[in-house]
């Protein structure tokens, strides 16, 4: 089984055909998906999706694009909402200095709030990082000095230094369809340096469809393409990487392991 560790099933691209999306995922060997929060105020939407199908888990948090809309969500709210049995992570939260849709100081403050919630709950933090490597490393290491927490650097497309900092802190690194693009040889080089027990795969659907379906609306089924090309990059049999990334997922997302009867994962 392949796990799409990061997608957005609540987005309008999936509104008309969610059963079809899940059926195509199943047919492609993708048996579990995590639909990722971008706004805390949409909690009921994420919860309903996860309660509607045992293949779906969810997270709770505020995307950096939306930090200006939700600058003051307290840690206590994140902790309380994350108690739902199918809520398996905090986030996505982080820094995005490429689009700068929220003030940078607000992004940083909201990000630190999410780190605190991850530390308090023991749930993994889903980290969004774009064009902010130095500031991201500063916050991650500063917060880790206050107490450990679990995390994944999702849809990784940053520099090698951030990847290795994440590995030093014990984080996972998740690769999306970006790693399959022809121009992404540098990113594939970084992937080769990541310990295999830290690797995850994802779509970030509906965005970033991998080769050979680039240009289409991305969906969880296409995780299989990313996994195949990542396996080629690592000179591994796809079945071996599939088993490894699924095991890695359940180790990091412990509540998902519990829900699926894999508490020993």
Image: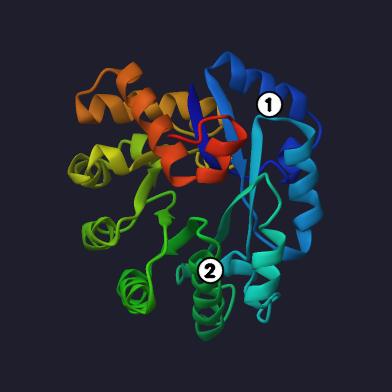
* Proximity of marks 2 and 1: CB atoms separated by less than 8 Å: no
State the image coordinates of residue 259 (x, y, percent, origin top left).
62, 36
Residue located at (51% from left, 73% from top): 116
Residue located at (76% from left, 48% from top): 47
Report which quarter residue 217 is drawn in: top right
State the image coordinates of residue 42 (x, y, percent, origin top left).
77, 58
Q: Can I make out residue 172 in this image?
A: yes
Between label 2 and label 1, give the one nearer the viewer.
2
Q: Secondary structure at mark 1?
A: helix
Front residue of 241 and 12: 241
Q: Is residue 136 above or below residue 262?
A: below
Q: Which residue appears farthest toward the top when viewing the image? A: 27
> How far is the residue under mark 2 from the one under mark 1?
34 Å
Q: Secondary structure at mark 2?
A: helix
State the image coordinates of residue 92 (x, y, percent, origin top left).
55, 59
Q: Is residue 212 above or below residue 72?
A: above
Front residue of 143 and 181: 143
Q: Is residue 75 above or below residue 252?
A: below
On the rendered structure, is 26 left or right of 11? left
How dense is the environment of label 1, judged by Cα within 10 Å: few (below 14), some, or many (20 and up)? some
Front residue of 161 and 58: 58
On the rendered structure, is 147 left or right of 195? right
Tell which circle, 2 or 1, labels the residue nearer the N-terminal end.
1
| Color scheme of the displayed model | rainbow
State the image coordinates of residue 100 (x, y, percent, origin top left).
52, 74
Residue located at (59% from left, 72% from top): 101
Residue located at (59% from left, 68% from top): 65
Residue 120: mark: 2
Residue receiving disc 1:
21
């Amino acid at each position: 089984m392949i796990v799409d560790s990061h997608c957005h099933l609540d987005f309008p691209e999936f509104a008309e055909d969610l059963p079809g999306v899940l059926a195509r995922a199943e047919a492609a060997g993708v048996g579990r998906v995590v639909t990722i929060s971008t706004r805390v105020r949409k909690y009921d939407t994420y919860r309903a999706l996860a309660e509607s199908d045992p293949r779906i888990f969810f997270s709770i948090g505020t995307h950096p694009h939306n930090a200006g809309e939700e600058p003051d969500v307290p840690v206590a709210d994140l902790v309380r909402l994350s108690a739902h049995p199918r809520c398996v992570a905090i986030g996505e939260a982080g820094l995005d200095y490429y689009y700068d849709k929220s003030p940078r100081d607000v992004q940083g403050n909201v990000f630190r709030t999410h780190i605190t919630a991850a530390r308090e709950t023991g749930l993994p933090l889903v980290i969004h990082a774009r064009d902010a490597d130095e500031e991201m490393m500063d916050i991650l290491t500063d917060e880790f000095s206050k107490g450990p927490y679990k995390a994944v650097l999702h849809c990784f497309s940053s520099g090698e230094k951030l990847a290795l900092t994440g590995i030093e802190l014990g984080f996972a690194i998740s690769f999306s369809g970006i790693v399959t693009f022809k121009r992404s040889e540098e990113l594939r080089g970084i992937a080769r340096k990541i310990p295999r027990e830290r690797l995850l795969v994802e779509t970030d659907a509906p965005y970033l469809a991998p080769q050979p379906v680039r240009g289409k609306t991305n969906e969880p089924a296409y995780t299989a393409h990313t996994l195949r090309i990542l396996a080629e990059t690592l000179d591994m049999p796809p079945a071996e990487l599939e088993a490894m990334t699924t095991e890695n997922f359940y180790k990091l997302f412990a509540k998902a392991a519990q829900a699926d009867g894999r508490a020993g994962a």
